[in-house]
Amino acid sequence: VLFNANSPGPVYQAGCRHVFGDDPCGMNPAALAVAATVTGMSSTSTIICDLAGADHAWDHGRVIMASGLNAGLTRSVKTSSPGRLELYGPFPYPPQPGETFSAMPGCDKTLARCTSHANAVRFGGLPFVPVPETGT
């Protein structure tokens, strides 16, 4: 009987346990994609572009290059600010002004981000669980 039990048991955590875009999440990141253009001299790991939005709006998202020497390549966004994306991994070639790409938002696994996407009903975390305490 013990071998039939699910192991490990459920994890109680504040952050969402779903992967952004999987079935339990229900979001389609590709549907949220925005076309953008490189506007300034960029490096292999930083893109200067015409993307708007608040600071950190594109964090944990993806960039798919549509033109230039990096066409078809995808990288994850480490951090963002209006007009600037810092990537986790570098592209082989620096994106040049005028090249186009598609940017998809990411998820920081918080209830606030899920609410901003009108998806709070599918949030997979437990934000009101008390934080663990350490005894001394």
Image: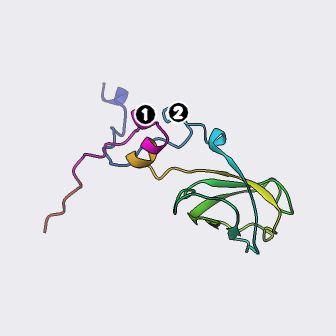
Q: Which residue shows up at 57% across the image and 64% down it?
A: 80
Q: Amino acid at mark 2?
A: Gly
Which of the two discs, 2 and 1, labels the residue nearer the N terminus? Answer: 2
Whole-percent x, y for residue 58 in the image: 57, 56
Instruction: Pick the residue in front: 4 or 81.
Output: 81
- Read off the residue under disc 2: 26
Cα separation between marks 2 and 1? 7 Å
Q: Residue at label 1?
A: 122
Residue 86 position, x and y percent, is 62, 68
Query: Was residue 123 drawn as part of the magenta stretch in this picture?
Result: yes
Question: Would you place residue 116 above or below residue 92 in this image?
Answer: above
Question: Residues at badges 2 and 1 in contact (C-beta under 8 Å)?
Answer: yes
Query: Can you give x and y, in whole percent of width and height, for residue 5 in the image?
Result: 34, 29
In which quarter of the view is residue 46 placed?
Answer: bottom right
Q: Quadrant of the C terminus?
A: bottom left
Q: Indicate left or right for 101 with 27 as reference.
A: right
Report the predominant secondary structure element of the magenta stretch: loop
**Residue lying at the far top of the rendered structure:** 1
Which element type, helix, strand or loop, lies under badge 2?
loop
**Colour option used:** rainbow
Residues shaded magenta: 115-130
Query: Is the N terminus in the top left, top right, bottom left or bottom right quadrant?
Result: top left
Question: The disc labelled 1 sits on which kind of residue?
Answer: Arg
* Residue 17 is at least partly visible in this image: no
